[in-house]
Image (cartoon, rainbow, N blue to C red):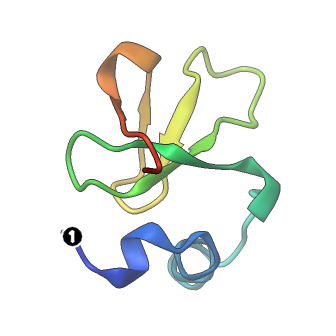
Amino acid sequence: MNNLHSKNPYWILKRYSLINGFNNYKLKHAIKDIYCHNCNSILFKEIHKDIDYSYVCLICDENMYSFETIKKSND
């Protein structure tokens, strides 16, 4: 999936909330230069302390370590 909404943290959070019925993630958790290796969406910092992963893709609903991500510059 590579569309307009996969790069917009607001729409990602909105979609996640609608699907799951709740959302603990905030816009400040979005990381705009690190992307999911599956769907190319921006990632969020993992906020759950009991999970060992650094990032989460709210589109794929998959947690990731930093070596599993794609880093892109904003140039």
Residue at image point 41% right, 81% down: 5
The number of numbered discs placed on residues in the rendered structure image is: 1
Residue 3 picture location, percent across and down: 26, 79
Residue 54 picture location, percent across and down: 59, 23
Q: Nearer the viewer, residue 38 or 21?
A: 38
Q: Is residue 18 above or below residue 52?
A: below
Residue at image point 59% right, 69% down: 9
Q: Is residue 28 above or below residue 34?
A: below
In this rendering, would 44 be left or right of 15? right
Quadrant in which the N terminus appears: bottom left
In this rendering, would 12 be left or right of 3? right
Q: Is residue 64 above or below residue 62?
A: above
- Rate crowding at label 1 as few (under 14), some (14 to 19) or many (20 or more) other CA atoms within 10 Å: few
Residue 45 picture location, percent across and down: 66, 38
Residue 33 picture location, percent across and down: 50, 43
Q: Is residue 26 visible?
A: no
Residue at image point 33% right, 55% down: 60
The residue identified by callout 1 is 2
Q: Residue furthest front?
A: 75
Local SS, label 1: loop
Residue 65: which quarter of the image?
Answer: top left
Q: Nearer the viewer, residue 43 or 56?
A: 43
Residue at image point 55% right, 20% down: 53
Q: Is residue 66 visible?
A: yes
Residue 40: which quarter of the image?
Answer: bottom left
In this rendering, would 38 be left or right of 16? left
**What residue type is disc 1 on?**
Asn
In this rendering, would 31 be left or right of 75? right
